[in-house]
């Protein structure tokens, strides 16, 4: 059956900007479901998050957006999101930027206080999208 | 031609139910009645047969605070998951995967004692993860995915 074939069709997505031989795909598309890697907002030049927290958030979310686009999807296709945050006092500041990335319905989300994040980031954003 | 028309009619009937033409599983965003505060997430998203649940804290829904009693905090989490599942016509036994985030792993046993009482028979797959401090000083945040039986 064609349907069974399409449900198991799989594509590993690796952005050209990944820059080094990291042992993960930026996302994996299985059938209609896209599993997106955790993204942090850092500047490729410095390997550090920018001074400006809002810019860091935008860099992380822009990364999610670019990965979605590589699978022919948009932010509206996100169904499930985890935000790992090194300091949950930044909740409101994250939300202010986050909500500008959506026009209609919002994905289900967890906002989780984490330990130290890679690159000294304040946030790591992971998610799943369904076409 | 007649046969083609018949096939088209069947396809249209199926299409209206499952949205095969756009290749999209049906999707519904769930907001629970108790969800106040205008926060930027849905309590759950149903895509096809799969329900993606938001992370839940054990806040008292009338005060918005984490209760002093730890068991009550855990019950609040489980009850809100249950009611979110209920909004999608699902039950706790349809949960397939669960993540529990907890800043204090010494609470593992206490969590499990309450958690297990919410399931009839089999348990979902689960991760129990030591986290940093959680929102509102919560001891747990629980997120999960359920699939309709």
Image (cartoon, rainbow, N blue to C red):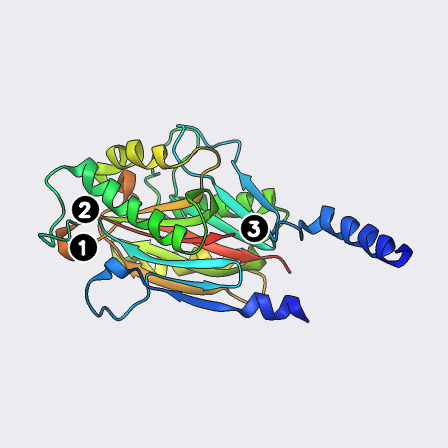
Q: CA distance from mark 2 to mark 1?
A: 7 Å
Contact (Cβ within 8 Å) of mark 1 with mark 3? no
Instruction: List the single residue furthest toward the right.
Output: B2
Q: Report whether mark 2 lies on the same chain as mark 3.
A: no
| Residue that label 1 marks | A117
Q: Chain of mark 1?
A: A
Q: What SS does tag 3 mark?
A: strand
- Point out residue A25 in the picture as x, y percentages from the top left corner: 33, 66
State the residue position of label 3: B47
What kind of element bears circle 1?
loop
Residue at 63% over, 69% down: A4
- How would you rate the neighbour count of disc 2 (Cα within 10 Å): few for under 14, some for 14-19, many for 20 or more? many
Rendered location of residue B39, percent (x, y) = 38, 32
> Can you give x and y, in whole percent of width and height, for residue B146 in the image?
53, 56
Check contact, mark 2 vs mark 3: CB within 8 A.
no
- Tell me which numbered mark, 2 or 1, is placed earlier along the sequence: 1
Q: Is residue A27 above or below residue B14?
A: below
In the rendered image, which residue does mark 2 sit on?
A: A122
């Amino acid at each position: 059956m064609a349907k069974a074939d399409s449900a198991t069709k799989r594509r590993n997505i690796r952005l050209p900007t990944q820059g080094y031989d990291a042992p993960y795909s930026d996302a994996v598309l299985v059938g209609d479901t896209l599993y997106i890697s955790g993204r942090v907002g850092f500047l490729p030049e410095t390997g550090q998050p920018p001074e400006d927290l809002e810019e860091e958030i935008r860099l992380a979310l822009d990364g999610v957006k670019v990965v979605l686009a590589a699978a022919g999807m948009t932010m509206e296709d996100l169904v499930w999101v985890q935000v790992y945050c090194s300091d949950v006092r930044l909740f409101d500041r994250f939300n202010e930027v986050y909500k500008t990335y959506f026009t209609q319905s919002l994905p289900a989300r967890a906002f989780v206080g984490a330990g130290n994040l890679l690159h000294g980031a304040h946030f790591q954003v992971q998610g799943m999208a369904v076409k | 031609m007649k046969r083609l028309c018949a096939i088209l009619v069947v396809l249209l009937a199926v299409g209206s139910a499952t949205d095969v033409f756009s290749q999209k599983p049906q999707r519904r965003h769930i907001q629970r009645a108790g969800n106040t505060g205008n926060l930027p997430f849905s309590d759950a998203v149903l895509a096809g047969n799969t329900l993606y649940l938001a992370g839940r804290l054990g806040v008292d829904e009338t005060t918005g605070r984490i209760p002093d009693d730890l068991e009550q905090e855990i019950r609040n989490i489980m009850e809100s998951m249950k009611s979110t599942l209920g909004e999608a016509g699902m039950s706790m036994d349809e949960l397939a995967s669960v993540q529990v985030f907890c800043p204090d792993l010494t609470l593992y046993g206490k969590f499990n004692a309450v958690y297990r009482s919410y399931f009839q028979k089999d348990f979902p797959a689960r991760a129990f993860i030591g986290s940093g401090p959680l929102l509102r000083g919560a001891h747990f945040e629980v997120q999960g995915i359920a699939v309709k039986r």
